[in-house]
Amino acid sequence: MQDSEFHELVDELFNRIEDGIDGLDQDVDVDASGGILTIEFADGTTAIISRQISNHEVWIAAKSGGYHLSLDENHTWICTATGEDLPALLSRVISVQAGAQITICN
């Protein structure tokens, strides 16, 4: 995959995540800046989603840990440590940090 294709895929992904979080009824905010999504929770904690260009991965840094995701052969973002797809992982991480069950679909 070329870097330009990776950037395009991640830009689309970040837009879907941002739209999903903006649509939540919970007190969770998202800010996109400099190719990074920062998710801020009511208690002041944050989770960061960033692109790692050199290895074509998306990284999530949250209160519950750090996660690396890469595209599989079906173009699904999969966590290299847990095997979860991005919607499942992100829903779990955000739910833990927000203290409420939250589902992010994308």
Image (cartoon, rainbow, N blue to C red):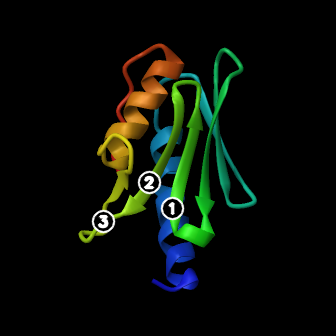
Label whose residue precedes the other's in the sequence (3 or 1): 1
Residue ID at (31%, 48%): 85
Q: Quadrant of residue 11?
A: bottom right
The residue singled out by tag 2 in the image is 69
Residue picked out by circle 1:
57
Front-lying residue, 55 or 45: 55
Q: Position of residue 89 (x, y in %)?
A: 38, 38
SS class of the residue under badge 3?
A: loop
Mark 2 packing: few (<14 Cα in 10 Å), some, or many (20+)? Answer: many
Q: Which mark is residue 72?
A: 3
Element at label 2: strand
Name the residue nearer the viewer: 35 or 64. Answer: 64
Distance from the alpha carbon under mark 2 to that under mark 1: 5 Å
Circles 2 and 1, Cβ within 8 Å, touching? The answer is: yes
Q: Earlier in the sequence, mark 2 or mark 1?
A: 1
Q: Is residue 87 left or right of residue 25?
A: left
Cα distance, mark 3 to mark 1? 11 Å
Where is residue 24 drawn, in percent x and y? 46, 32
Amino acid at dot 3: Asp
Where is residue 79 shown, x and y percent of the image?
38, 48
Q: Amino acid at mark 2?
A: Leu
Please tell me how crowded label 1 is: few (under 14), some (14-19), or many (20+) other residues with Cα within 10 Å: many
Dot 1 amino acid type: Glu
Please indicate whether residue 84 sits to the left or right of residue 22 in the image.
left
**Farthest-out residue, front:** 81
Quarter of the figure with the N terminus? bottom left
